[in-house]
Image: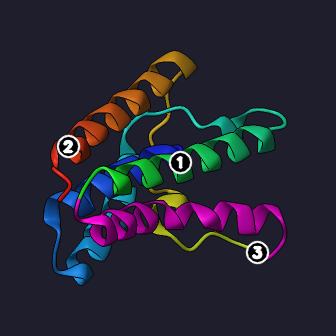
Amino acid sequence: MWFITHIALGGALGTWIKRPIWLIVILALSSHLLLDMIPHWDYTTIFRWESLAIVDTLSGILLIALMMQRNRHRTACFLGGIFSALPDLEGLLIHYGYLSRYYFPSHIRPFPHGSSEMFGGILVQVLIVLVSLFVTMREKRD
């Protein structure tokens, strides 16, 4: 899954759960595993994917800022989003030579990492982001 998809679902989880923080962290990390199992399309399968990773990361940062601005549970939203997306930093650390292998369970073979063709794989991620935004935006800000 893309960074923005993990950010969106994690932010929604944090907003919905609110407290305790340890539960948000555990569920956000678990959501990363579950999202990776859903058939999706990863841009890392194409040549010169780095520019898409930059756009994805910046979009995720903007999205979590918007989500935090729109609800009163900012810390929970932020932590949910960050911890849900955090395992994907592993891929960048490997790409740039700071790690030699994957450690997060859904990034290690033979974990069932879902894959699909491009259109359907992007569509499922857009739907997850939209539902996550809906959940987050329903929270009223004080």
How crowded is the residue under tag 3: few (<14 C-alpha within 10 Å), some, or many (20+)? few
In the image, the segment drawn in magenta is 72-99
Is residue 98 in view from this perspective? Answer: yes
Point out residue 66 in the picture as x, y percentages from the top left corner.
42, 48
Point out residue 20 in the picture as x, y percentages from the top left corner.
17, 81
Q: CA distance from mark 2 to mark 3?
A: 38 Å
- The kind of secondary structure element at disc 1 is helix
Q: Which residue is mark 3?
A: 100
Q: Nearer the viewer, mark 1 or mark 2?
A: 1
Name the image quarter holding the C terminus. Answer: bottom left
Magenta residues: mostly which secondary structure?
helix
Q: Amino acid at mark 1?
A: Leu
Q: Which mark is residue 75?
A: none
* Image position of 128 (left or right of 117): left
Q: Which residue is mark 1?
A: 62
Height in image: 120 above or below 17? Answer: above
Q: Amino acid at mark 2?
A: Val
Looking at marks 2 and 3 on the same chain, the residue that comes earlier in the sequence is marked by: 3
137 is within the stretch colored magenta: no
Residue name at image x 17 percent, y 69 percent: 18
Decide which of 96, 129 is in the foreground and name it.
129
Looking at marks 3 and 1 on the same chain, the residue that comes earlier in the sequence is marked by: 1
- The kind of secondary structure element at disc 2 is helix
Looking at marks 1 and 2 on the same chain, the residue that comes earlier in the sequence is marked by: 1
Q: Which mark is residue 135?
A: 2
88 is within the stretch colored magenta: yes
* Image position of 52 (left or right of 129): right
How crowded is the residue under tag 1: few (<14 C-alpha within 10 Å), some, or many (20+)? few
Height in image: 7 above or below 84? Answer: above
